[in-house]
Image (tube, rainbow, N blue to C red):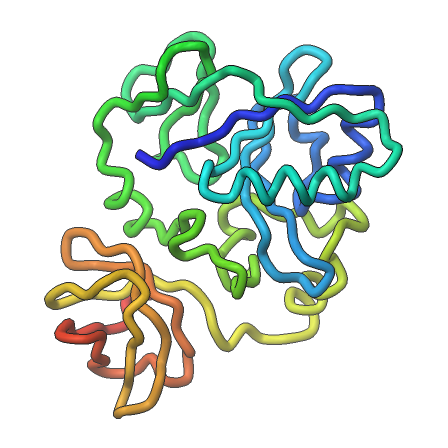
């Protein structure tokens, strides 16, 4: 289970601050979690996270692997806005079984179960999260999602992580252009994998680079592919890879 850091954002400008930065519409906080990302001005991925309303504050659930740099970036954007960013002292609990009273559904996909934040130690119910992520092509921070990622190539539209009607946010112009004016030629897809290969192994097709192989489970994997080369049998180190949709 990846470690998460639960931040608390407070202050009178919190909602407007987030709305002008993140890829999703925070009006959705009235209905539960909002899954969103922060992008560079060039439209590339910086961080993905969950937002949750907690009284007059907003909780922000982000991978611990990127949390320090993420907080620095938020602080840079904050300027004189009335927003405070601090550790909440809460931890993540998650699972796919019967949820506790304080839990809410993971907004990315029903099979991703529920999430809750309490003062208990971080925990889950033993769910095979990689198997679920591979089945539904759900990327993970610092594995499939890196500084080279574009969110539309990373299926954020399917994961309800981007809103095209909310107005401006950092990286919005590039994201909107990819949505409305271009056809995606690369992106994350599910592949069949005969064998195994380290995360990040290059995939080749006919000796030409065709992508990279990431998380694998039960004979399938998540791969970043050049769609024009994702035909027939491909190679990733000693593994044979075939496109699965």
- Quadrant housing the C terminus: bottom left
Instruction: Look at 50% across and 51% down and name the residue there.
Output: 158
Residue 211, how many percent across, how many down?
37, 75
Determine whether, in the image, residue 33 is placed left or right of residue 171.
left
Q: Quadrant of residue 182?
A: bottom right
Q: Quadrant of residue 2?
A: top left
In this view, 182 is above or below 171 = below
Determine whether, in the image, residue 12 is placed left or right of residue 34.
right
Residue 73, how many percent across, how many down?
68, 44
Residue 58, how many percent across, how many down?
66, 22
Most distant residue in the right direction: 80
Instruction: Look at 19% across and 65% down and name the residue there.
Output: 197
Residue 110, how many percent across, how many down?
39, 34
Q: Nearer the viewer, residue 94 or 76?
A: 76
- Quadrant housing the N terminus: top left
In this view, 185 is above or below 15 = below
Instruction: Look at 28% across and 39% down and name the residue there.
Output: 129
Q: How many marks?
A: 0
Instruction: Look at 13% across and 74% down and name the residue there.
Output: 238
In this view, 34 is above or below 179 = above
In this view, 160 is above or below 88 = below
């Amino acid at each position: 289970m990846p470690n998460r850091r639960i931040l608390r954002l407070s202050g009178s400008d919190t909602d407007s601050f987030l709305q002008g930065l993140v890829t999703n519409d925070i009006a959705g906080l009235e209905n539960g979690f909002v899954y969103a990302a922060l992008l560079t001005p060039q439209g590339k991925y910086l961080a993905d996270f969950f937002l949750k309303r907690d009284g007059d504050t907003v909780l922000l659930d982000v991978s611990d692997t990127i949390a320090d740099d993420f907080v620095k970036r938020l602080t840079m954007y904050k300027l004189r806005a009335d927003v405070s960013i601090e550790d909440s002292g809460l931890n993540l609990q998650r699972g796919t079984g019967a949820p506790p009273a304080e839990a809410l559904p993971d907004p990315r996909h029903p099979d991703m179960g529920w999430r809750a934040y309490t003062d208990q130690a971080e925990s889950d119910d033993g769910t095979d999260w990689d198997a679920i992520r591979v089945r539904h092509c759900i990327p993970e921070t610092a594995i499939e999602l890196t500084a080279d990622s574009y969110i539309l190539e990373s299926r954020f539209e399917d994961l309800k992580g981007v809103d095209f009607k909310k107005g401006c946010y950092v990286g919005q112009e590039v994201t909107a252009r990819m949505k409305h004016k271009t056809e995606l030629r690369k992106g994350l897809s599910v592949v069949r994998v005969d064998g195994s290969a380290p995360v990040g192994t290059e995939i080749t097709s006919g000796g030409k680079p065709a992508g990279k192989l990431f998380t694998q489970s039960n004979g399938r994997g998540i791969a970043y592919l050049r769609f024009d080369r994702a035909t027939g049998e491909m190679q990733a180190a000693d593994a044979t890879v075939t496109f699965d949709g």
